[in-house]
Amino acid sequence: MTKTALVTGITGQDGSYLAELLLTKGYRVVGVVRRSSTTPYERIAHLVDRVELVSADLLDQTSLTDVVQAAAPDEIYNLAAQSFVQTSWNQPVLTGEFTALGVTRMLEALRKAAPKARFYQASSSEQFGKVVETPQRESTPFYPRSPYGVAKVYGHWITVNYRESFGLYAASGILFNHESPRRGLEFVTRKISDAVARIKLGLQHELRLGNLDARRDWGFAGDYVDAMWRMLQQDEPDDYVIGTGETYSVREFCELAFGAVGLDYRNHVVQDEKFFRPAEVDLLVADPSKAREQLGWTPTVNFRQLVEMMVEADLARYRTAR
Ligand code: GDP
């Protein structure tokens, strides 16, 4: 029988990769989009004929309950959020509404309209923030460092709480940073790959960045959506850390990205205080052994391949646009 998946955040990076994966597995995919005067569907332009788009908003309980009722999903993937850390200091209340309370609203919609559906919550390595231990695993205490991280901690715990309170099948994936050519341009990896392409083609000369010493565990988004799906195929719902187990600095990302096109980042990167954060997350690195052992999940793209993939994609995009 065809399974139905409901995906919030389908127009985002992860939503688009997840929709592709679910379609190849034969799912009926229903994507939740927010009404807007423009249609920002570029990431799913190649999929719009094959997915059903329905309108609802994480700020509006009625709309969520109605779309869950109408779609009758077997699986719900809650990927929608205000997902950019820097913005969460400028819009802390809105970030809490979407990224924290939005999860409760989705869980309430599921509880009322599809209590047998399996629920995936997009938790985040930003919950570890000022890390208490290294590497970070499922049992590592949270210490978020931004309104975004705080909101994600709430989303994580309300998912655990609804699982324990109501016996729902609710799982949460604590995903470390995951990137791709579809990453938003505001995130540091894509900001760098885009600038490298522009500098290589003579469209720009310098790149202004903030803290170059921050370290992240960066993986490929296409691998990470596969982990989400695997989590919902287990007999029992649980929480999993997903990452590569390797950590690199923003500076190392720059070195490789500029190096990929024969340039030296030191000739182009300028540090700008504007991009420093009020509180920083200095180091993240996952211990993904539980996911490896229980989900059979391992990443297929390493750091160097990820950097090169992103630079090549941005170069190709600017070349065809010329
Ligand atoms: P995050 O881990 O979700 O905050 O992902 P980002 O890609 O936004 O940031 C990753 C790290 O890169 C953070 O430690 C930032 O402080 C650092 N960083 C340094 N310069 C920049 C910049 O210009 N933009 C962004 N977004 N991050 C930067």
Image (tube, rainbow, N blue to C red):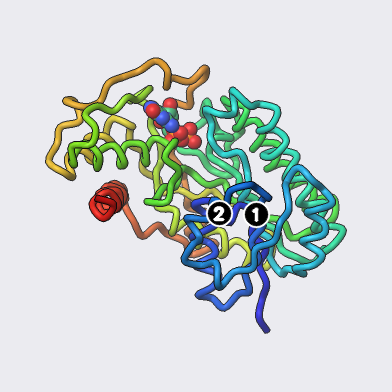
Residue most extreme to the bottom: 1
Looking at this view, is 61 or 204 the one in front? 204
Inspect the image, locate mark 2, and give the three-letter code of the amino acid beneath it. Answer: Thr
User: Which disc is residue 33 wearing?
Assistant: 1
Which residue in the protein does label 2 denote? 11
Residue drawn where x is 61% and y is 38% of the image: 82
Q: Quadrant of residue 167?
A: bottom right
Residue most extreme to the right: 112
Residue drawn where x is 16% and y is 25% of the image: 267
The answer to whether residue 167 is seen in the rendering is no
User: Are there few (<14), some (14-19), or many (20+) residues within 10 Å of tag 1?
Assistant: many
Residue drawn where x is 40% and y is 52% of the image: 220
Distance from the alpha carbon under mark 2 to that under mark 1: 7 Å
Is residue 269 shown above or below 69? above
User: In the image, residue 251 lies at what x, y percent?
Assistant: 28, 30
Residue drawn where x is 44% and y is 36% of the image: 186
Q: Quadrant of residue 276?
A: top left
Inspect the image, locate mark 1, and give the three-letter code of the amino acid beneath it. Answer: Val
Q: Secondary structure at mark 2?
A: loop
Mark 2 and mark 1 residues within 8 Å of each other at the beta carbon:
yes
User: In the image, residue 156 lies at what x, y percent?
Assistant: 68, 43
Indicate yes or no: mark 1 CB to ligand 1 under 8 Å: no
